[in-house]
Image (tube, grey):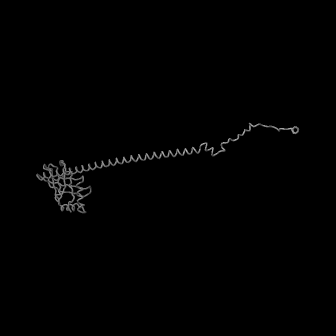
Amino acid sequence: MGFDDFEPIFGQAKAEWSTPNSPPLRPFLFNVHVSGSSCLKVHVSDFYSNTFEAVRSIEQLEDLRDMIGIGGSWCEFMDYLVASIKSDDVKLILDGQPRADGAAYAKLVAQKSKGMPLISISLAKLVDANASEVMANLSLEVYKAFKSMQNLLVKEQDRCCLLTKVISAEQEKTETIQKQLDTFLYSKRQKSLKMNDKSNTDALSATGLQDSPEKLAAQNPGSTKVAKRVVPAYRRSKVRGVLLQDTTEDGDN
């Protein structure tokens, strides 16, 4: 049980007075971080007249868990606490009447989502040197967090740039291979078409030789003879009657 792997949390709290009709408040920033190995610190400030602090030990956080009724293990409770503080609905409630030097007390209220248990942490007001020290530390921690995020962003951009170059190089290789493949397929297709054309030409030549007049004449010699013409009936000589011969005269002669 402890605060292993607990990363500092920064955020902006929605500040409001507990009493109605109160003057508007400046924006508040908060920071939740581990102090030592057994304490959790909460700092909240508007960097003007309101700076607050809360320190919670593991035992106090255990009491908080029992009070709000969150079951499960310690790790599950810490996960819920972190999720609540990182949510977009973190409020800072300032107690008492508005004064020139700010509120005397405040509490940080966070909720993971509507209908879930509320995390409420009471805060004590800091003044003078203590308040100045917290504001200075909070400013420095915010800057460190910003630089850390900036470095991560730069690394991610460099990684994306490198990946973009690798992808571009791979695309060029792919395009080159595709062009080579297209050229090969085109050449193969043209060769196949030429072979088909030659085969068709040879087939036509062979068919032409088979159907030549000389070959047809050799195969059908009788077909070259001219058939005897038949004289039409209307052009034939018509013979009427019977030719009579004198058999006596023929015998005498």
The residue nearer to you, when weighing 122 against 10, is 10
Q: Quadrant of residue 73?
A: bottom left
Above or below, 74 relative to 48: below
The N terminus, quarter of image:
bottom left
For the image, the number of numbered tags is 0
Residue 250 shown left or right of residue 180 in the figure: right
Q: Position of residue 119 (x, y in %)?
A: 22, 57
The residue nearer to you, when weighing 100 against 215, is 215
The C terminus, quarter of image:
top right
The residue nearer to you, when weighing 68 against 190, is 190
Q: Position of residue 107 (x, y in %)?
A: 18, 55
Above or below, 119 relative to 251: below
Residue 115 shown left or right of residue 178 in the figure: left
Q: Which residue ends up furthest to the front in the rendered image?
A: 253
Q: Position of residue 209 (x, y in %)?
A: 57, 44
Q: Position of residue 202 (x, y in %)?
A: 53, 45
Q: Which residue ends up furthest to the left in the rendered image?
A: 129
Residue 149 shown left or right of residue 231 in the figure: left
